[in-house]
Image (spheres, rainbow, N blue to C red):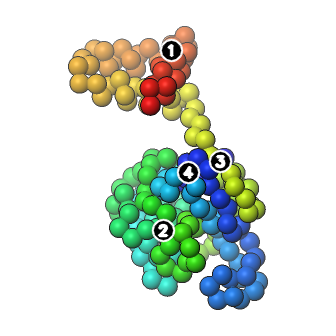
Amino acid sequence: MISCFKGKFRVTSPRGVRTDPITGKKGTYHKGLDLVGIDDTTVYSISSGIVRTAYEAGGAGYYIVITMDDGRRVYYMHLKKGSFKVKNGERVSKGQALGIMGSTGNSTGLHTHLELRVKGTSYDDLDITEFTGIPNKIGVYEYKEQLSDKEKHEYAVSCACNVEDKTGLEKQTINWLWTYKYADDLFIKLWESMDRQK
């Protein structure tokens, strides 16, 4: 599972047919998931891609679109005014902070509408629950960030190479070690050590 919220969060409105909470109209189609952050109200990117920020007074409010490398687009709607942590055209990584949960646009309360759309400019949606693994039903869930060994390695190298007294040779050695299988455990242990120090 991956979520735009870290820790515990609540699904308040699943994807699918529902009664529109604004108009009261029955049988309207909800293209995404409405999520409420419980432990953390910061909204994080669930993918890497290119940023587009926008505002729609009568609908999504302040929102961010991340276009992934394959062209699919992830929408983060109803963000708090003035909370954007990214800019138009910026490339973001999976897990990067985008903004803060809000209630702008057509909204009945604090939440983030998370939606996945097809490549291009179409309004056609894709199954965000299949993409994220978040259950498509009302309830409280928890997202614990899990990184692959490769991601742990990249993080460890980044931390090690950002230390001011590292020489160029030491930086090369750090990357060189990773080419050998016996170094896998070394980087995993380094990651675990860093994690314990947080």
Q: How crowded is mark 2: few (under 14 residues within 10 Å), some or many (20 or more)?
A: many
Residue at image point 43% right, 59% down: 99
Counting from the top left corner in percent of width and height, residue 47 is at: 53, 51
Alpha carbon distance from label 4 to label 1 = 32 Å
Residue denoted by label 4: 39
Where residue 82 sits: x, y (%)? 35, 67
Residue labelled with disc 3: 142
Lateral position of residue 191 relative to residue 87, left or right: right
Q: Which residue is drawn at 26% across and 19% down?
A: 166
Viewed as shown, does residue 8 lie left or right of 64?
right
Give the mark toward the camera: 4 or 2: 4
Residue 26 occupies quadrant: bottom right
Give the SS element for disc 3. Answer: strand
Q: Nearer the viewer, mark 2 or mark 1?
A: 2
State which tag comes first along the sequence, 1 or 3: 3
Residue 36 image position (x, y, % from top left): 59, 61
Q: In this view, does 92 lie above or below 11?
A: above
Residue identifier under label 2: 102
Query: Are the residues tagged 3 and 4 within 8 Å (C-beta)?
Result: no
Q: In this view, does 52 lie above or below 69?
A: below
Camera-near label (1 vs 3) is 3
- Residue depicted at x 55% and y 51%: 39
Q: Earlier in the sequence, mark 4 or mark 1?
A: 4
Q: How many labels does the image show?
A: 4
Residue where numbered disc 1 is placed: 186
First in sequence: mark 2 vs mark 1: 2
Q: Earlier in the sequence, mark 3 or mark 4?
A: 4
